[in-house]
Amino acid sequence: MSATDQLTALDATFLELEQADDSALMHIGGALVFDPLPGGGTPTIGQVRADLERHLDRLPRYRQKLGAPRTGGLSWPSWERDEHFEIDAHVGHATLPRPGDERTFLDWVSDFYSHRLDRSRPLWEMVLLDGLPEGRWALGWKTHHCLVDGVGSVDVIDLLLSGDSAPDGRAAGGGPNSAGSTPGESSPGGARPERLSEASAESGHGWRPHPPEPIRQAAGSGLAAARVGAHALMHPREALERSRGVVDLLVRDELIAAPHSSINVPIGATRRVATVHVPLGEVQKIRAALGGTVNDVVLCAATGGLRDLLLARGEVPPRHGLRAMVPVNIRSAGDHGELGNKVSSLFVELPVAEIDALRRYERVRAAVQKQKASGQALAAGTLTDLAGLAPPVLHVTLARSLFARRLFNLTITNVPGSPLRLYALGAPMVDIVPIVPLAAEHALGIAVISYAGGMTFGLCADRATVPDLDILQHGIVSSLRGLAALAHTRVRAR
């Protein structure tokens, strides 16, 4: 077994979160939606399995399983080849029940996502779903977070689809206006995305002798600690930034906990999914006019939606805001296509108590800039590294503290997908519905992905405790329209 076959502490964290609470489902995924095949109709399950298996040689870990289904003891689980791997056990087929509309589609996605992956097999699953409107079809997929993170999952999608061609023979990624729907013009059930100027609020919704395992594990931890110390000596400024950031995080966790909220209660394991679709160009117009980044626009839109949700529940929005965990990609350019987790986090206060839309946006921008300047993402990575020095039998307590309700209220992740059109079996992919996992006592999460000129907000919630997910959905739309109006006014004033 090579060092790379063993899970890292961060990878193992997501297994431990599941073991600690039955309500935690730690797989990521969603649905990929395609137009009909070039000759019409949908592919057969045999075609999908054959095409996917052809690509799996690029992803050998997708044919591997955990050496031990649970963490704990004195060593981390490792990846080993599944000698009984069968593509049929991982790629299934289903037909969308009538009426096959957007709501039915998202109900199917919600149910698919509500079931855990079998830890005795490679930790991924895909389903060919037909019966969508206008002859469309979808691939529902889920992959355990211990195998890949959000950015890595998008890289996997690009890798799996990059060998396919457009109907006219062009390579995949033939451009945002290649065959199929115009970017941002369709959602899974055929609904148009949210035009921010429209009044309606529809949305779719290695051979060497090995020492005994305990000694090897202890030696590994010692080497890791030595590397941390050596890195600090070689990079004193970064070490200082990390130290300050760690102190800030510890104070935040122990003294200034995230506020109490109705979205942080005990939850079940059944999920509810909703979506909001918006043209990426309109979000970029807001960013250009008001300053900041696309991610600032995303966080502000989420803040407006969360404010509406709290008010509708008769809840006073916390004065200091709800705290969002915002994953930060720390992959280098050469890391794309690699599996495992390479991510840290920012913890951003979302000003849900702010009434004025422009002031709300400015406060979101300032909060993000402050956390970036504080080195908080480095600090979160340091805490994860330090937690990894603990033996697995003790790591579970540390892992749970990194995803505790006291630390943050919800996760909001924004991942850039391909700007170009992708294809499978010659059919253009017209939409991606992203889903973020929910840890215990986190009833709500928001995943955002941009693709081929469009942007999709994937809202994932606990079905029992968030029956009013549509309020958040429409609140995001309303917040985006308000920002678009402010952007238009500022452009005219210039």
Image (cartoon, rainbow, N blue to C red):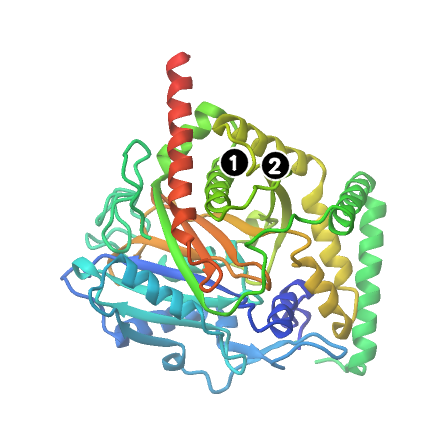
Q: Secondary structure at mark 1?
A: helix
* Spot occupied by residue 115 in the image (x, y as percentages of width and height): 45, 73
Any part of residue 103 in sight: yes
Hey, which quadrant is residue 95 in on the image?
A: bottom left
Picture residue at 79% right of the left edge, 62% below the top: 224
Image quadrant where one finds the C terminus: top left
**In the image shown, does 26 or 420 lie closer to the viewer?**
26
What amino acid is labelled 1 in the image? Asp
Tell me if 168 is positioned left or right of 424 in this view: left
What amino acid is labelled 2 in the image? Val
The extreme front residue here reads 314
Asked if residue 191 is positioned above or below residue 493 in the image, the reply reads below
* Spot occupied by residue 451 in the image (x, y as percentages of width and height): 37, 47
Picture residue at 49% right of the left edge, 58% below the top: 436
Picture residue at 71% right of the left edge, 40% below the top: 375
Residue 296, numbered circle: 1
Name which of mark 2 and mark 1 comes first in the sequence: 1
Picture residue at 20% right of the left edge, 64% below the top: 99
Q: Which residue is mark 2?
A: 368
Asked if residue 213 is positioned above or below residue 368 in the image, the reply reads below
* Spot occupied by residue 81 in the image (x, y as percentages of width and height): 54, 80
Q: Secondary structure at mark 2?
A: helix
Tell me if 259 is positioned left or right of 249 in this view: left
Image quadrant where one finds the N terminus: bottom right
Residue 365, numbered circle: none
Mark 2 vs 1: CB contact within 8 A: yes
* Spot occupied by residue 247 in the image (x, y as percentages of width and height): 80, 45
Hey, which quadrant is residue 483 in on the image?
A: top left
**In the image shown, does 351 or 241 lie closer to the viewer?**
351
Q: Residues within 10 Å of mark 1 (few under 14, many from 20)?
A: many
Tell me if 71 is positioned left or right of 446 in this view: right
Marks 2 and 1, how far apart at CA: 8 Å
